[in-house]
Image: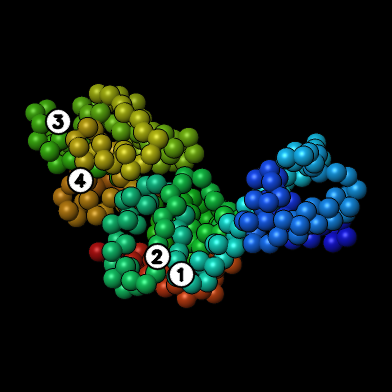
Amino acid sequence: MARTLPSLELIRGFEAAARLSSFTRAAEELFITQSAVSRQVQALEEHLGTALFERRHRNIRLTHAGELLYRAANQALLILGDTATRIRQEGTQRSVTVSCTFGFASLWLVPRLMDFRELHPDVDVRIAANNKIIDLERERMEIAVRYGTADLVPTGTPRLFGEEVFPVCSPALLERRGKRLTVPSDLARHVLLHHEGAERHWPTGSWGAWLEAVQLSQLRPAGSLRFDQYDQLIQAAIEGQGVALGIGALVKRHLRQGRLVAPFEQKSSSPRGYYLVVARHAAGRSEVASFRTWLMRAARRDARN
């Protein structure tokens, strides 16, 4: 490969000349002489065995081969430039990017980030919320909080907390006439809020599974609302639009602050949980270790309260 690849210096001179349609302007951009650019292009043409430009009296024009090479060279130089910039920034800036679900980000992580910022004001945190599983090594992210079963994460990955599911609603909803929630069968008077992601991928966390567990599989609610994102579903519950299935760790803060109530004692557990994954390329960085330690302590503290 080393024998077939032309030198980067020749590529830079050619790319500038092709992009600017001028040897003279390319020379000005690269801070070299016009004749130096011309020699670089000529050397590259000799290396490839074909002409890259049609040279005219007042201008130059790419040949077919030149157009092919320009597209590849331009893209390659952009990638190299962006990568070099990122490496320089990583060398001078202490930052951590955290991949997690939308629901975990908005309902659990973001409300607690101020605590981390007070402890580590020199560390920048970026939240990359996405319900898809991101390849940390390929995307160059440092930490992921994975939601799912233990077989979806590497062996030995620490679990932040498990999943306990139970109905929650706004206290204002219970004050409306005819809307009491004393026993689970009273759900027939209410609108149920469904998380479509759970019903598609984790049916054990759906209303159907919960109602079956309390022997009410035939219950017909007053209505249904469906949401793609779990944080939107919980916001609808806070606004009194219906009854949601709360994931214990994610709704605990709203329960403590009185925005939500859990009307029944019946709860169900699932094999799912939230797991903390650290990318191999970032495991030795002190700021990543600090965030990992803080996150695990916050999860333990939250479980005790």
Q: Which amino acid lies under the numbered mark 1 shown in the image of this protein? A: Gln
Label 1 or label 3, whichever comes before in sequence order: 1
Secondary structure of residue under mark 1: loop
Q: Is residue 7 left or right of residue 145?
A: right
Q: Earlier in the sequence, mark 3 or mark 2?
A: 2
The mark nearer the N terminus, 3 or 4, is: 3
Q: Residue 180 location in percent, x, y?
A: 14, 34
Instruction: Write down the residue under mark 3.
Output: 179
Residue 212, x across and y down, in percent: 37, 35
Q: As shown in the figure, which amino acid type bears the numbered disc 4?
A: Leu
Question: What residue is drawn where x is 21% and y is 41%?
Answer: 238
The residue identified by callout 4 is 260
Residue 124: which numbered mark, if any?
A: 2
Amino acid, disc 3: Lys
Q: Nearer the viewer, mark 3 or mark 4?
A: 4
Tell me the residue at 48%/72% (across/down). Answer: 92
Amino acid at circle 2: Asp
Residue at label 1?
Answer: 93
Q: Is residue 275 visible?
A: no
What distance separates the C-alpha of mark 1 from that of mark 3?
54 Å
Label 3: state its secondary structure.
loop
The picture quadrant where one finds residue 136 is bottom right
Tell me if mark 2 has few (under 14), some (14-19) or many (20+) residues whose alpha carbon lies within 10 angstroms of its own. few
Q: Residue at x 37, y 52 (%)?
A: 105
Q: Badges 3 and 4: C-beta atoms under 8 Å apart?
A: no
Residue 284 vs 227, above or below: the answer is: below
